[in-house]
Image (cartoon, rainbow, N blue to C red):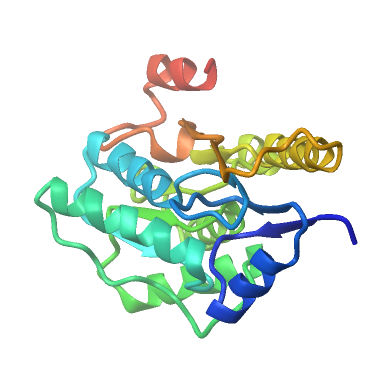
Amino acid sequence: MEAIILAGVHHTALARQLLKQARLPVVETFELTNDPVDINIGMSQEDAGHAATMHLIERGYRRISFMTGNFDPRAKSRHAGYLRAVEEAGLVSQASISPEPRQSSIALGTQLGRFLLEAGDLPEALFCTDDNIALGATQACLKKGIRVPEDIAIIGFHDLEFAAYASPSLSTIATYRYETGRLAAEKVIAALQGAHGSEACRIDTGFALVERESTLGRGWDRQDEARHDEVMAK
């Protein structure tokens, strides 16, 4: 083994010690940390969660819930961003919709969506921790006659390919996964060739808000073709 590329920055004290002692290039990806083991390439999950929630707030939504399949470290960071945005706007955070820890999937999103509908007191908007959950929740709503975005807005995370082609198309946070992998590989190759210095390296890949049909704003209806065309042209 000549290098280690990891997803995430959360390690036990022992794991971190072993990584430090490995004398190999170590790349931690998909999150940012102020204290990288060696090379850190990622984005602020909390800032991305904040941006997603602020998008909903700026579109006029006030009762916003957070839905996740698993409160892993990245989901917790996105939730922290959600809470920060809600607090900054002077709103009250809604109860999170989360089962026992389970791997994210469209099927799980559908199940969570059904749970939300059965619980009653539907929120105005829903921030889902990823696009799989968002698509499943959207389908659960539509099957029960709950319109998206007219009755509830839904935003996902990651900008997976299907998000643009769902009906309605899903607003989401685009994360640069391919770019992250490319940079990680380049940094490893440079380190193996002796071009990597002794100082830790940190690269923020950033993220982007992608607005689509599922969060067109309060009061929008399908007669509003001008607003629809503006969003779809982006």
Q: Position of residue 84 (x, y in %)?
A: 23, 53
Q: Position of residue 21 (x, y in %)?
A: 69, 68
Q: Residue at x 61, y 57 (%)?
A: 132
- Find the residue positioned furthest to the bottom: 100
Left or right: where does residue 90 sit relative to residue 124? Answer: left
- Find the residue positioned furthest to the left: 90
- Find the residue positioned furthest to the right: 1
Left or right: where does residue 58 sit relative to residue 90? Answer: right
Q: How many marks?
A: 0
Left or right: where does residue 27 sit relative to residue 228? Answer: right
Q: Nearer the viewer, residue 177 or 13?
A: 13
Report which quarter residue 227 is drawn in. top left
Q: Position of residue 14 (x, y in %)?
A: 60, 80
Report which quarter residue 228 is drawn in. top left
Q: Nearer the viewer, residue 146 or 45?
A: 45
Q: Nearer the viewer, residue 227 or 142?
A: 227
Q: Residue at x 24, y 45 (%)?
A: 61
Q: Position of residue 100 (x, y in %)?
A: 51, 85
Q: Nearer the viewer, residue 134 or 75?
A: 75
Question: Which quadrant of the rendered structure holds the N terminus?
Answer: bottom right
Q: Residue at x 52, y 18 (%)?
A: 234
The image shows residue 220, relative to residue 119, as above or below, that is above
Left or right: where does residue 64 sit relative to residue 182? Answer: left
